Image: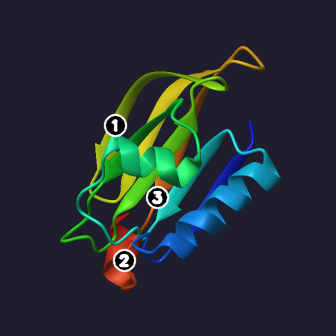
Amino acid sequence: MIIVSLNIRGIGGGTKASYLKHVIAKEGAEFVCLQETKTTNLSDNRCFVLWGDNNIGWLHNEGVNGAGSILSLWHKEASCYDRHVVGSDFIAIMGEHLKSNRSCVVLNVYAMCNISDKISL
């Protein structure tokens, strides 16, 4: 499975969406983990634009007022979603990687920039 993980530091502008689409296409990404999206409200259409395709699944953890928010996206032709667990600073996606026919878990993690939060995580 080809996984791309980026600390995007905000996905508000079109420049970052274009960059993300470029990285996904160049790397042939099947699963994308974004940290620090700095957004509290996402829609299917916004996620489709970020990936450049509408055949994706996604889960978003809003963090606290957008701070520490994380987003996991996967292409449905590569991964079959089964279930998920969302914690205060992580998203765990369980499913099957269709190309290899294997069960998998992808964990998208973000800890705030203070030592006590990192130790807690």
Q: Mark number for residue 109?
A: 3
The picture places residue 82, in percent across and down from the top left corner, at 45, 19
Crowd around label 3: few <14 · some 14–19 · many ≥20 (10 Å): many
Amino acid type at image mark 2: Met
The residue drawn where x is 69% and y is 18% is: 98
Q: Mark number for residue 112?
A: 2
Q: Distance between the residues labelled 2 and 3?
A: 10 Å
Q: Nearer the viewer, residue 119 or 56?
A: 56
Crowd around label 1: few <14 · some 14–19 · many ≥20 (10 Å): few
Q: How far apart are marks 1 and 2 (CA)?
A: 19 Å
Q: Is residue 55 left or right of residue 44?
A: right
Q: In this view, does 23 lie above or below 91?
A: below
Badge 1 vs badge 3, beta-carbon distance below 8 Å: no
Q: In which quarter of the image is the C terminus?
A: bottom left
Q: Is residue 77 above or below residue 69?
A: above
Q: Earlier in the sequence, mark 1 or mark 3?
A: 1
Q: Quadrant of the N terminus?
A: top right
The residue drawn where x is 78% and y is 19% is: 100
Furthest toward the left, the residue is 65
The picture places residue 70, in percent across and down from the top left corner, at 40, 59
- Secondary structure of the residue carrying tag 3 is strand
Q: In this view, does 22 lie to the left or right of 17?
A: right
Q: Mark number for residue 85?
A: 1
Amino acid type at image mark 1: Val
Q: Which of 27 and 19 is in front in this view?
A: 19
| Quadrant housing residue 83 | top left
